[in-house]
Image: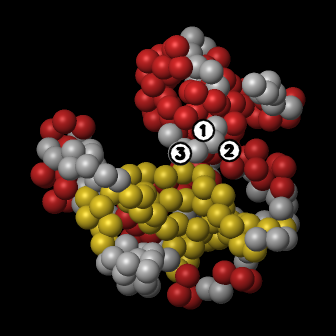
């Protein structure tokens, strides 16, 4: 079997992320993300553990991953900070907010429900059963693949009826929020306090909703380099980040 090896720069980035975690468990991040990078097949935690040869300690790593959820905003901020330092785009930085469904199977999947299917495919299925993630992604231009999104942070959206049916308020202290109410603190939380922007750059945050539903996410901000707008009022081609 080939030996897994990360170069010094990637290892330094992971160690930078690990510095935000408790010292007693922070060392687990490097082998876990090594497994993530070398995993093949389905993108599941068990695949990461197999690729990283960590299966013997799977219980410890499952617990470790669950603790990362408490640090997700600060970790996402550092990921964006590293990306900005490496790519360093001049001009505007385009960040998109969208709701992304992921299909799930089985009647007992926590947080899952029936949602509109944005990509029906040949079967023409109008609905999909699974999770919906409110995702914040940095949109950049690739010389071969065109515009691509680099995901920074995602939060699980659960409908009110699914919260009630699954008793998530009682079991998980989950309360209902609209997608845009979820998206606003998600965007400002990782942009404003942590992220150094290149000189004379503005961060433009675009969501794909209509202007009417865009209102909750159009609150004023005290960050002079942060701009919110709707995709219906802006051509994304004019603000897309340069090639990476």
Q: Which mark is residue 42?
A: 3
As displayed, is residue 222 above or below residue 216? Answer: above
In the picture, measured across the screen, residue 60 lies left or right of residue 4, that is left
- State the residue position of label 1: 75
- Residue 225 shown left or right of residue 210 in the figure: right
Classify 10 Å Cα crowding around label 3: few (below 14), some (14-19), many (20 and above). few
Residue contact at pointers 2 and 1, CB within 8 angstroms:
yes
Task: Identify which residue is drawn at 64% across, 38% down.
Answer: 39
Q: Nearer the viewer, residue 195 or 71?
A: 71
Q: Which numbered disc, 3 or 1, marks the residue closer to the eye?
A: 3
Q: Label 2's element?
A: helix
Question: Measured from the top left, where is residue 99 in percent x and y?
Answer: 44, 66
Coordinates of residue 124 in the picture (x, y in percent) = 37, 81
**Residue at coordinates 76% horizontally, 71% vertically from top-left?**
145
Q: Can residue 71 be seen in this snapshot? A: no
CA distance separating discs 2 and 1: 6 Å
- Residue located beneath label 2 in the image: 79
Q: Is residue 55 above or below residue 66?
A: above
Q: Secondary structure at mark 1?
A: helix
Distance from label 3 to label 2 (Cα)?
A: 23 Å
Q: Rounded to the nearest whole Å, what is the CA distance between mark 3 and mark 1?
A: 24 Å
Q: Residue furthest front?
A: 1
Which badge, 3 or 2, comes first in the chain's sequence? 3
Give the image location of residue 146, x and y in percent. Answer: 75, 74
Residue 210: x percent and y percent? 43, 84
Which image quarter: residue 236? Answer: bottom right
Number of marks drawn: 3
Residue placed at 30% from the left, 72% from the top?
127
- Badge 2: few (under 14), some or many (20 or more) residues near its Cα, within 10 Å? many
Mark 1 or mark 3, which is nearer the start of the sequence?
A: 3
Q: Are marks 3 and 2 in contact (CB under 8 Å)?
A: no
């Amino acid at each position: 079997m080939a030996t897994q090896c990360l170069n010094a720069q990637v290892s330094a980035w992971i160690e930078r992320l690990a510095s935000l975690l408790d010292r007693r468990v922070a060392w687990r991040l490097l082998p876990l993300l090594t497994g993530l990078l070398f995993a093949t097949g389905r993108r599941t935690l068990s695949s990461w553990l197999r690729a990283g040869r960590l299966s013997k300690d799977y219980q410890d790593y499952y617990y470790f991953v669950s603790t990362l959820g408490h640090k997700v905003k600060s970790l996402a901020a550092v990921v964006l900070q590293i990306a900005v330092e490496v790519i360093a785009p001049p001009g505007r930085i385009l960040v998109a907010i969208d709701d992304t469904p992921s299909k799930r199977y089985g009647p007992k999947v926590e947080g899952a429900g029936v949602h509109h299917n944005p990509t029906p495919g040949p079967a023409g299925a109008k609905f999909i059963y699974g999770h919906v993630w409110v995702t914040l992604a940095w949109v950049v231009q690739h010389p071969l693949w065109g515009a691509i999104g680099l995901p920074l942070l995602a939060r699980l959206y659960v409908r009110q009826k699914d919260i009630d049916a699954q008793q998530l308020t009682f079991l998980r202290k989950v309360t209902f929020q609209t997608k845009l109410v979820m998206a606003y603190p998600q965007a400002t939380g990782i942009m404003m306090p942590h992220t150094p922007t290149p000189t004379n750059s503005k961060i433009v945050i675009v969501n794909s909703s209509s202007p009417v539903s865009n209102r909750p996410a159009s609150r004023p901000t005290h960050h002079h380099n942060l701009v919110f707008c709707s995709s219906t009022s802006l051509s994304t081609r004019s603000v897309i980040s340069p090639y990476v």
